[in-house]
Amino acid sequence: MKSYLAAAIQMTSVSNLQKNLAQAEEFIDLAVRQGAELIGLPENFAFMGEENEKMAQAGAIAQETEKFLKTMAQRFQVTILGGGFPVPVDETSTRVYNTALLIDPNGQELARYQKVHLFDVNVPDGNTYRESTTVMAGKELPAVHYSRELGNIALSVCYDVRFPELYRYMAHKGADIIFVPAAFTAFTGKDHWQVLLQARAIENTSYVIAPAQTGINYARRQTHGHAMIIDPWGVILADAGEQPGVAIAEINPARLEQVRRQMPSLQHRVFV
Ligand SMILES: O=C(O)CNC(=O)[C@H](CS)NC(=O)CCC(=O)C(=O)O
């Protein structure tokens, strides 16, 4: 594994696929110009809007988004994580998988993950979320992609971050870098987002890369922002704040090794 720069992109995606992909392209370009080789896009980067609008376009969103990720990875010669976009379960189904896709610089698919934990929550700010009305829950544990160059990369999406057993599994499988692309609500995010991400980094002595949605996306939906990259000690290396932009930081195998030597908690596990 080498030292390199990673980027967590922060966007305000809206209910317009072309507009979102254009914004994503701008930020990928910006991240590449700053030297990033591994780049993550947030959950719902391709489309964020009313569920019925999303479902009406799901087939097109899935197709164009996958093509977009492959084109970007090849054009810029980087590895890209597309952090959660709708992919129809099958041709006849009325539901989608909330899918995260990792693409290499040749445009090849390295890993695919279907969000397991769906956000069916009445948030105390008055917003009601029922992700399961349109999304089919994935049934597989998260994918870990083994890379000698970039380190072992594991995928998760948003609400998953509240389920530590998922991340323990990734650690058990040898993960070095954990992606948590998200569209966290502003209300839960202000108290939980950073704490949960730091906990996942610290307890698994792994890097956490968390691309995020920010601002007002549509109607009353406001997202928290603070896309960030956290090191295996839990130190926040970069935080995108509240405006759309890019958080960039170094992924360093020597740091990973050092932290795992200083805090060998993964070796002291008793139950999992
Ligand atoms: O509904 C939208 O338009 C955007 N949100 C999403 O797509 C997803 C599923 S509803 N959001 C989350 O998982 C938020 C989790 C979260 O905020 C928490 O765990 O606190």
Image (cartoon, rainbow, N blue to C red):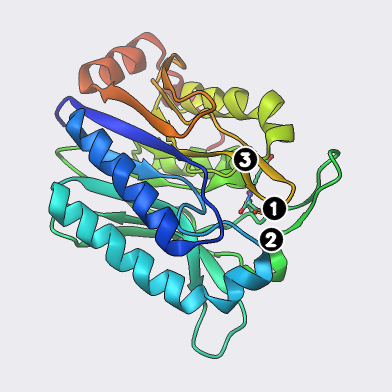
The residue to which callout 2 is attached is 131
Between marks 3 and 2, how big is the CA–CA gap?
Answer: 13 Å
- The reply to whether the C-beta atoms of the residues labelled 3 and 2 are less than 8 Å apart is no
- The reply to whether the C-beta atoms of the residues labelled 1 and 2 are less than 8 Å apart is yes
The residue to which callout 3 is attached is 184
Please state, as top left, top right, bottom left or bottom right, where the N terminus lies in the image.
top left
The location of residue 115, given as percent across then percent down, is 54, 57
Residue 133 marker = none
Which residue type does callout 2 highlight? Answer: Glu
Picture residue at 23% right of the left edge, 21% below the top: 252
134 to 125, vertically: above or below: below
The answer to whether residue 146 is visible is no
The answer to whether residue 220 is visible is yes
Answer yes or no: disc 2 within 8 Å of ligand 1: yes
Question: Is tag 3's residue or tag 2's residue first in the polypeptide sequence?
Answer: 2
Which residue type does callout 1 highlight? Answer: Phe
Secondary structure of the residue carrying numbered label 2:
helix
The image quadrant of residue 174 is top left
Which residue lies most toward the top here? 262
The image quadrant of residue 70 is bottom left
- The reply to whether the C-beta atoms of the residues labelled 3 and 1 are less than 8 Å apart is no
- Relative placement, left or right, of 44 versus 51 is left
Secondary structure of the residue carrying numbered label 1:
loop
14 to 198, vertically: above or below: below
Picture residue at 15% right of the left edge, 56% below the top: 74
Q: Residues within 10 Å of mark 3 (few under 14, many from 20)?
A: many
Q: In this view of the protein, which residue sits in the foreground, 197 or 225?
A: 225
